Every structure is written in structure tokens, then in C-alpha cells.
Amino acid sequence: METSFSKEQLKDKDNKSSEKIFRKCVHCGFCNATCPTYKLLGNELDGPRGRIYLIKDMLENNKPPNEKIVKHIDRCLSCYSCMTTCPSGVNYMHLIDHGRNHIEKTYKRSFNDRFIRSLLSTALSKSINFRIIAILGKIAKPFQFFFPKKMREMISIMPVRFPTKTLPTMNVYPAKNKKKPIARVALLTGCVQKVISPQINEATIRLLNRHGVEVIAPKGIDCCGSLNHHLGKSNLANKDFKKNISIWYDEYLKNGLDAIIANTSGCGTTLKDYGFIFRADENKDLRKKAKKISELTKDITEYVEDKVKLNFIKRSTNEKKYKIAYHSACSMQHGQKIHQGPIDLIKKTGNEVSDIPDGHICCGSAGTYNLLQSDIAKKLLENKIDNIKKVKPQIISTGNVGCIVQIAKATKIPILHTIEIIDWYTGGPKPKVLKNL
Ligand code: SF4
Ligand code: SF4
């Protein structure tokens, strides 16, 4: 694709790298075939190729976008299915991130839009804020019909109760039965996940500790920053990024870290991109640290598969075998290119694992997308559930809490994080949601 950035514009680091990406695109349109919004809406501007043109036009002309451009960019799920399909290696993720930042800086949204986006940014990027807003949401639930649509969606999705934690909050979770741990890793415990699904971190810690890995959860780490990053709020996102980089890098230098573990693939994708985000920062030290943090980051299934010799244990609680449908989260399969590993891990438990038809298509969760673009998200969820039903599973498994929440809204089939299954078959408790199975 030809570009017409001026020399002056190319002095900007973001323009410079986006220009390189634009030039890789040969406008073949293969990516449209696997884009959920293009498939659903049939409009070129709701597909990756059309969006690339919109972003290019907006950046080259260095002008605020109009309402139409914002509508089509906002409809992108950031699922990155287009990146898996693209034969030319176009990094659409970096283009859409740049486009969103430009919109946030130059376009004035309606009051309602600004309000809901600020609310999401505040509510979801800190666990304490999420708890407070969830309590307010619970109080507002009976009156939700008086609220505007997006607020209603948000109130309806808020949990009515928080699950009880079974592990105390500690900074260091020591390895069990080993005088010297085989490894030392930091776990990103997350912001929303640790409130609504503490069992995922607990399964991760238990499994790693049992297999001789020390787990640390340093104070001060909360959100990975991806929520604000995808809302285009780069200033807020950068604050989280820099704080996390500094805390983890200090730990890496002082006590050693073999890996940083993400058990929510959406967050893992962003951690693996810290190096790119700060690639041209004027602070050389930050560039080096960000790169290291990205190199250290592993999805929990990736880490377990590569570094842990799993000890599967047969017990009365796991004698029965199940049919498990594996939902490959977009951030896992397209963002991190991890797909077969989690399936192979589950297969080691002796259970039958099925792929879901059209498994490359998003379930509609996509961070805050199910709240901001609820009509499209609902349609994608309906399609996902229809496809899940085709394989008639007893359990669904995935590696991203957003997908768990989204899919659980529309089915009674129990849905587990993949690591909960592996923990259960290697000595952990049977997950509570399976009590009737
Ligand atoms: S598949 Fe890749 S090269 Fe082809 S239009 Fe899409 S982004 Fe461009
Ligand atoms: S990220 Fe997903 S929704 Fe956005 S253009 Fe690519 S395939 Fe389409």
C-alpha cells in the first residue's frame, strides 16, 4: 500500500512504525474472510482492509476523524483474527492501537460515550474500584431499566456476589516439598479476574507450588494496562505499564525471575507487547526494561507445557472422563499464537477435547466490547453458543476470564479456565462448578 506521510510526520515514532506496516499491506482482502465484524455486517469499512484505509487516511492527513470513521474503528474487536490470516504479515494490532490513540486525542465523543468510557476505565482497571462499582451496580440492579442502554448492560453484567477466596493474599507462595524451588515466577494476579474468579489464580499458584515453582505476587501490581490501552487512553495505560515494568524489573534484578505468568490471555498479549510500546522511548533504560518484561512473559499453559513436568494423579474425584470443548480465546490464538498447546495439555488428563466449529471467530467478549458494542457482541455470542452446542460438550475450557464471563451468560454448560482442569488432575480440588457432573 502506498503512503504519503511527509518527512516531518515520519519523525514521529508511531507514524514511522505504522507507515512500515501500511506498506506491507497488498490490499488482497484475505483478512476480510475471517473478520467477525465483516462477516456479520458485510461492509468493507467493518473489515480489516477498510479499517486500515481509514486509519491511514486519518494519520496521513493528521486530522480528527469524523463520526463515520470512529464508528467503524470502534466496531473492531481487536480480536486479531485478521493477523492470523494475513499472508503479508501486516501487524494490524499496532495499527488499530495507533488509530485508537489518535481518535482519543483528536475526536470529541458525545457526553454519554465519554461518560461510559471513563466509567469503564475507572471501574475495570483497579480491583478496589471494581469492587466498589460492583456493589453500587448491585444496588442499582432493580432500577436498571431507568438507565441508558450501555449503563444497563454494565449493571446487568456486574456480579451479585464475589466468590470466596481459599488462599490468603501473600507476596510469596513458596514451592511445596522442595528445599530449592525449580523456578521462581511472578504471577500477574490481574484486576477484575482476582475479584470475580479468584479460583483461577488459586489453581495457578497451587499447581505451580506443587510442582516445585515459587510464585510471587509483588505488591503494587494491579492492572496490566490493556483496558485503557484498548480504549485509546494511552496516558493512563502508560502509567500502569511503567509501574509494572519497574516493579517486575526490580524483582528480576534483586531476587531473579524465571518468568512472568499471565493466566488471562488478553493481559498476556499486552505484556508481550510492552517491548514494542516503549521501543522508541527517550528513556533508554525503560526501553531495555520493557523489552525484558515482554521476553519474560509466558501464558500459564505455555509455561507449564515447556517448564513443568506434570504429575497426573488418579483419584476418586477425577476418575470420570468428560467431553470438553476448547474455546481458543482470540488473544490466545491470534494475539499470542498459542492454540494447540492448551488442547494437548487437557488431552493429557485423559479427557476428550473437541475444537469448536468456527473457533477462530470471537465470542464477542473482547475486553469492554460486550458493553460498548453490545448488539454485535450478542450476535457473536449467539453464534458461538450455536457452534459450541454442535460438539455437545459437558465442559467448556478456555484461557481468558473475559470469554468465561461472556460465554457463561448464554449457557448452563460449566466453563473452566484450562489451568483449573490441569490443577484438578494433578492433585488440586475438583472445581466447584462441576459439583453436579
Ligand atoms: S490480508 Fe493482509 S495484505 Fe491482505 S488486505 Fe488484509 S491486511 Fe492487507
Ligand atoms: S481485529 Fe478482528 S474485528 Fe478487528 S479488523 Fe481484525 S479481524 Fe476484524
Image: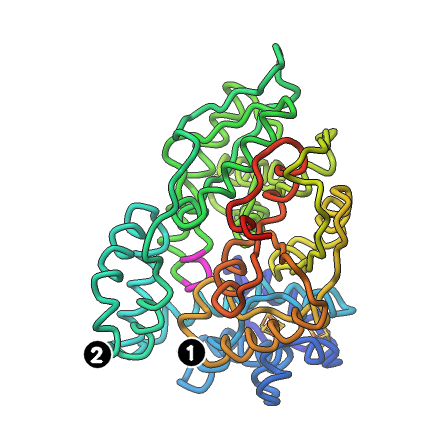
Residue 388 location (% of width, % of height): 65, 69
Whether label 1 lies within 8 Å of ligand 2 gets the answer no
**In which quadrant of the rendered view does residue 152 lie?**
bottom left
Depth check, front residue: 356 or 266: 356
Q: CA distance from mark 2 to mark 1?
A: 38 Å
Q: Quadrant of ligand 2?
A: bottom right
Residue 396 location (% of width, % of height): 62, 58
- The residue sitting at 47% across, 26% down in the picture is 250
Q: Is residue 295 magenta?
A: no
Depth check, front residue: 280 or 383: 383
Residue located beneath label 1 in the image: 63
User: What main secondary structure does the magenta stretch of the protein show?
Assistant: helix
Q: Is residue 230 magenta?
A: yes
Q: Are marks 2 and 1 in contact (CB under 8 Å)?
A: no
**In which quadrant of the rendered view does residue 310 lie?**
top right
Depth check, front residue: 405 or 19: 405
Query: Secondary structure beneath disc 1?
Result: loop
Tell me, for residue 146, which label it has, or none: 2
Query: Secondary structure beneath disc 2?
Result: helix
- The residue sitting at 59% across, 33% down in the picture is 428
- The residue sitting at 66% across, 43% down in the picture is 301
**In which quadrant of the rendered view does residue 211 lie?**
top right
Q: Which amino acid type is shown beneath numbered disc 2?
A: Phe
In the image, the segment drawn in magenta is 227-232
- The residue sitting at 61% across, 10% down in the picture is 179
Could you tell me which quadrant the N terminus lies in?
A: bottom right
